[in-house]
């Protein structure tokens, strides 16, 4: 007959074997490390677009118009909506005034050619089946070219005319011996004028090479803003 003292204790905690708690800690740390290693740190930066690719994309006015509209939308747009606005810009009329033929011509070109080309270049995300398009992160690299086209162009002829007038004035003053030019030789004055012309010519050339091949035409609404 058993007594109370002999009865087993049912709520007694099991004994912990040596190293058991430490083993659990190590296992938890290993799992945590594995999760950390599998978690992506940050999204990869888009690959830089080559200048040849940028110029090839922007040399077509219809593609430029499409990019301008997508930039202003700042979200995905329907292809039909994009085609209507591009057709209106191309014909210089309001959207309500474009004809069915004009709309269809632009829609077909965007659907079959221009948007697939921009999608292959990684500039837009184009879902051809759903007819939805939006700019990708790589499209930000085109901003420097598109924004440049919306600004008034530099009137380089005014720079050259100013240099010519100024150069003639300086050379005339040095030839007549007017102070302080009488203290400076005519050769030095001529050299300064030539250097000034060369500097403007270099700036003009650099500016021209940054522009797309056909002048970088922008939609009328953006030119007026």
Image: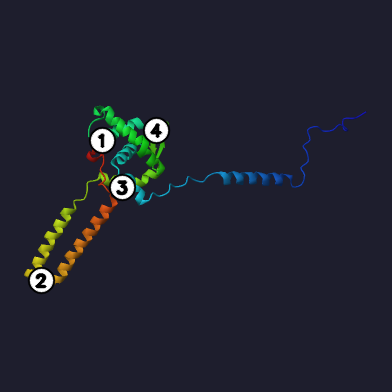
* Earlier-in-chain disc, 4 versus 2: 4
Residue 88 in the image: x percent, y percent? 26, 33
Q: Earlier in the sequence, mark 3 or mark 1?
A: 1
**Frontmost residue, 187 versus 103:** 103
Q: Which residue is mark 1?
A: 89
In three-dimensional space, the C-alpha distance between marks 1 and 2, rounded to whole angstroms, equals 59 Å
| SS under mark 3 | helix
- Asked if disc 1 and disc 2 are in contact, CB closer than 8 Å, the reply is no
Could you say whether the residue bearing mark 1 is in a helix, strand or loop?
Answer: helix
> Looking at the rendering, in which quadrant would you find the C terminus?
top left
Q: CA distance from mark 4 to mark 3?
A: 25 Å
* Dot placed on the residue nearer the N-terminal end, 1 or 2: 1
Point out which mark residue 132 bears: 4
Query: Which element type, helix, strand or loop, lies under badge 2?
Result: helix
* Label 4, label 1: how far apart the Cα atoms are: 20 Å
Label 1, residues with CA under 10 Å away: few <14, some 14-19, many ≥20: some
First along the sequence among labels 4 and 1: 1
Question: Can residue 85 be seen at all in this image of the molecule?
Answer: yes
Identify the residue under disc 3. 145
Instruction: Assess whether mark 2 and mark 4 are in contact (beta carbons under 8 angstroms).
Output: no
The answer to whether marks 3 and 1 mark residues whose Cβ atoms lie closer than 8 Å is no
User: Looking at the image, how many numbered discs can be counted on the residues?
Assistant: 4
State how far apart marks 3 and 1 are (Cα).
19 Å
- At 10% from the left and 63% from the top, the residue drawn is 168
Horizontal side of 51 relative to 34 (left or right) equals left
Disc marking residue 182: 2
Name the quadrant of the N terminus: top right
Place of residue 151 in the rendered image (x, y in percent of width and height, measured from the top left): 24, 45
Quarter of the image holding residue 176? Answer: bottom left
């Amino acid at each position: 007959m058993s007594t109370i003292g002999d009865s087993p204790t049912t709520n007694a905690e099991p004994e912990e074997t040596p190293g058991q708690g430490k083993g659990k800690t190590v296992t938890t740390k290993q799992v945590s490390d594995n999760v950390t290693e599998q978690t992506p740190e940050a999204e990869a930066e888009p690959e830089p677009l080559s200048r040849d690719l940028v110029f090839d994309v922007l040399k077509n006015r219809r593609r430029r118009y499409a990019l301008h509209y997508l930039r202003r939308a700042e979200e995905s747009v329907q292809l039909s909506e994009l085609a209507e606005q591009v057709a209106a810009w191309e014909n210089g009329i309001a959207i309500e005034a474009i004809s069915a033929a004009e709309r269809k011509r632009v829609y077909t070109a965007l659907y079959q050619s221009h948007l697939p080309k921009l999608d292959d270049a990684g500039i837009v995300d184009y879902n051809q089946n759903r007819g939805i398009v939006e700019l990708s992160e790589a499209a930000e690299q085109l901003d420097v070219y598109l924004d440049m086209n919306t600004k008034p162009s530099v009137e380089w002829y005014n720079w050259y005319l100013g240099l010519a007038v100024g150069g003639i004035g300086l050379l005339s003053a040095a030839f007549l011996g007017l102070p302080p030019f009488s203290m400076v030789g005519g050769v030095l004055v001529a050299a300064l004028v030539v250097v000034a012309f060369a500097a403007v010519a270099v700036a003009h050339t650099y500016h021209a090479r940054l522009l797309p091949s056909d002048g970088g035409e922008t939609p009328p609404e953006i030119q007026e803003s």
